[in-house]
Image (cartoon, rainbow, N blue to C red):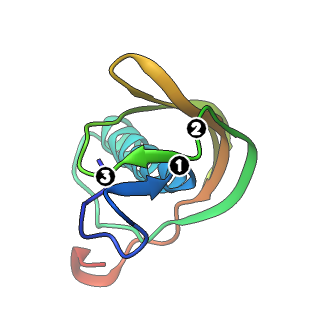
Amino acid sequence: MIATGHPLVVDGAAPALLVIELAAQAAAAMEAIGRRTVSGRDESARVGSLVRIREAQFSQAFVPAGAPIVVTADVLGSAPPLAIYAFRAAMNDVEVGRGVISTHAGQASAGGKS
């Protein structure tokens, strides 16, 4: 969901390209889950970066702020700390965006805090 108080929201609508931020957050969650699965334990938080956006397509220019958006991020490949994800975003089972993003997981932060 894109918050109604987001600075780019005008008259209750947000630019659809903000869906890319939601995709980056979904990718970060996948990366964190993957690290825990591999190590079997929680690790320190990491500050990641969105480093590339490819093939981003949106079915509409704006999405309603405050409305649920379901975002999936599937790993296409990785060479840690880099990874490539295909994302899909939908509202009420209707696709509003899709594309491919690349992320960099970064180093573990000191004390487990980002």
Would residue 87 be visible to someone looking at this image?
no
Q: Residue 16's mark?
A: 1
Q: How far apart are marks 2 and 1 (CA)?
A: 7 Å
Compared across the picture, whether 15 is left or right of 57 comes to left
Callouts 1 and 3 close, C-beta under 8 Å: no
Alpha carbons under labels 1 and 3: distance apart = 10 Å
Label 1 Cα crowd, 10 Å radius (few <14 / some 14-19 / many 20+): some
Task: Identify the residue under disc 3.
Answer: 65
Check residue 60 in the rendering and tell me which mark sits there, or answer none. 2
Gap between marks 3 and 2, in whole Å?
Answer: 14 Å
Is the C-beta separation of discs 2 and 1 under 8 Å? yes
Residue depicted at x 49% and y 66%: 48
Q: Which amino acid does label 3 sit on?
A: Ala
Q: Is residue 102 visible?
A: yes
Q: Position of residue 77 (x, y in %)?
A: 68, 34
Q: In this view, which residue lies farthest toward the right? A: 55
Q: Quadrant of residue 4?
A: bottom left
Which of these two is toward me, 37 or 25?
Answer: 25
Counting residues from the start of the chain, the first of labels 3 and 2 encountered is: 2
Mark 2 crowd level (few <14, some 14–19, many ≥20, 10 Å Cα) = few
Image quadrant where one finds the C terminus = bottom left
Amino acid type, callout 1:
Ala
In the image, farthest residue toward the front: 11
What label does residue 76 carry, if any?
none
- Secondary structure beneath dot 2 equals loop
Amino acid at the residue labelled 2: Gln
Check contact, mark 3 vs mark 2: CB within 8 A: no
In-image side of 105 versus 85 (left or right): left
Element carrying mark 3: loop
Is tag 2's residue or tag 1's residue first in the polypeptide sequence? 1
> Residue reaching furthest bottom?
110
